[in-house]
Amino acid sequence: MKTFKLMIAGLGIAIAAVPGVASAQPWQSVSARQANLDHRIDQGVRSGQLNRAEAKRLRNEFRGLVRLEQRYRAGGLNQWERRDLNRRFDALSAKVRYERRDRDHRGDHRRR
């Protein structure tokens, strides 16, 4: 758990330090990013790459981002809010990627 927290903290620093990297990729609408993340979580569950606890945490964070986007859109989505959503979606995307590759598979009952 401590390693995971350190990894997430390091990821946050890396994302903040290199803002141009995210803009180098093709732009996706917020709804396209939501659909993509939802699909990746579903695939991780189906393939066994995500266990129930991981999927639940990722889905809760995903739903929180959807609610935040709805609040932002209620007042009109400005540039700062769009950047904030993009940063948050980047971080969640990195978490999904990490959790799917951490070899903590469903059915793997060995303790580490």
Image (cartoon, helix red, strand yellow):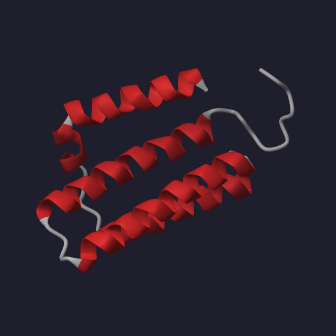
Residue 70 image point, x, y percent:
34, 74
Residue plotted at (29% across, 64% down)? 28
Query: Which one is nearer the viewer's eye here, 82 or 48?
Result: 82
- On screen, residue 63 versus residue 100, left or right, reads left
Above or below: residue 58 compared with residue 79: above
Residue 50 image point, x, y percent:
68, 47
Residue 4 shows in this picture: yes
Quarter of the picture holding the C terminus:
top right
The quadrant where residue 91 appears:
top left
Residue plotted at (16% across, 41% down)? 20
- On screen, residue 26 versus residue 48, left or right, reads left
Residue 89 image point, x, y percent:
37, 53
Residue 40 image point, x, y percent:
55, 57
Residue plotted at (31% across, 72% down)? 71
Above or below: residue 15 compared with residue 5: below
Quarter of the picture holding the N terminus:
top right
Residue 50 shows in this picture: no
Query: Which one is nearer the viewer's eye here, 23 or 56?
Result: 56
- On screen, residue 44 versus residue 27, left or right, reads right
Above or below: residue 1 compared with residue 46: above
Residue plotted at (38% across, 63% down)? 33
Q: How many dots with numbers?
A: 0
